[in-house]
Amino acid sequence: MNGRCDFVVLTKVGQRLRGMKSAKIASCGACVVLVPCRDIHTFGMKFPIDVAFVDGGGVVVEAYRRVSRARRLRCPHARMTIERRSCERDWFEPGDCIFAGPPPGRTLRGPSAEEGPVHETNPFEGRNA
C-alpha cells in the first residue's frame, strides 16, 4: 500500500462487536484494528470488507479480500485483526509485518542523542499502489 491510511483501534467489547458496521468508521475510509481479535463476522454488513489476521509478533498470518455479508472467519493464531471497506488498493498479504519497530509489549530502546529523534514510520511505505 502506498500513502497514509488512518487506523481506528477498537479494544472494548462493544466497539469490537460493531467494528466496521459503525457508520462513522465506514464513511471515513479508515482501517479498523480489533484488539484482541481472532474471530470476525460480517453479519449486518452492507458492503464487503478486506480482512487481515495478525499474530502477536505483528506478522500477517491470513488475509482475505472482498469478504461478503453473512460470513464468519476465524484464525486461531491471530492476536488482532485489521479490517477496511473493500477497495482496489493493495492489501496485506501473509508474511507482511505491520510493526515498524518491536511488537507491543517489548521495550523500545531509544536512539542516542547523536542519532536524532525517533520518527513514526508508515507501515505501507514502499509498497506498490
Image (spheres, helix red, strand yellow):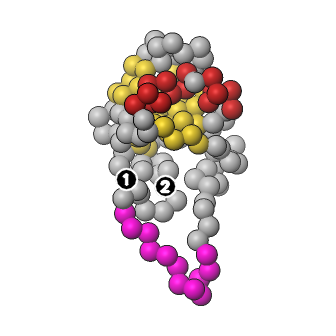
- Element assignment for label 2: loop
Amino acid type of the residue tagged 2 in the rendering: Phe
Amino acid type of the residue tagged 1 in the rendering: Gly
Horizontal and vertical percent position of residue 58: 42, 50
**Closer-to-camera residue (23/128):** 23
**Closer-to-camera residue (40/60):** 40
Image point (55%, 26%), residue name: 20
Image point (42%, 48%), residue name: 59
Horizontal and vertical percent position of residue 41: 43, 20
Q: Main secondary structure of the magenta part?
A: loop
Q: Are marks 2 and 1 in contact (CB under 8 Å)?
A: no
Find residue 113 and report its image quarter.
Answer: bottom right
Image point (43%, 16%), residue name: 71
Residue, disc 2: 99
Magenta residue span: 106-117
- Element assignment for label 1: loop
Horizontal and vertical percent position of residue 74: 35, 27
Find residue 26 and report its image quarter.
Answer: top right
- Indicate left or right for 91 with 17 as reference: right
Q: Confirm whether residue 98 shows in the render.
A: yes
Which quadrant: the N terminus? top right
Query: Around disc 1, counting alpha carbons within 10 Å, would you say few (fewer than 14), some (14 to 19), or many (20 or more)?
Result: some
Q: Is 126 placed above or below 52 here?
A: below
- Indicate left or right for 73 with 27 as reference: left
Image point (44%, 74%), residue name: 109
Which quadrant: the C terminus? top right
**Does 109 lie within the magenta span?**
yes
**Closer-to-camera residue (123/35):** 35
Residue, disc 1: 57
Q: Confirm whether residue 87 shows in the render.
A: no
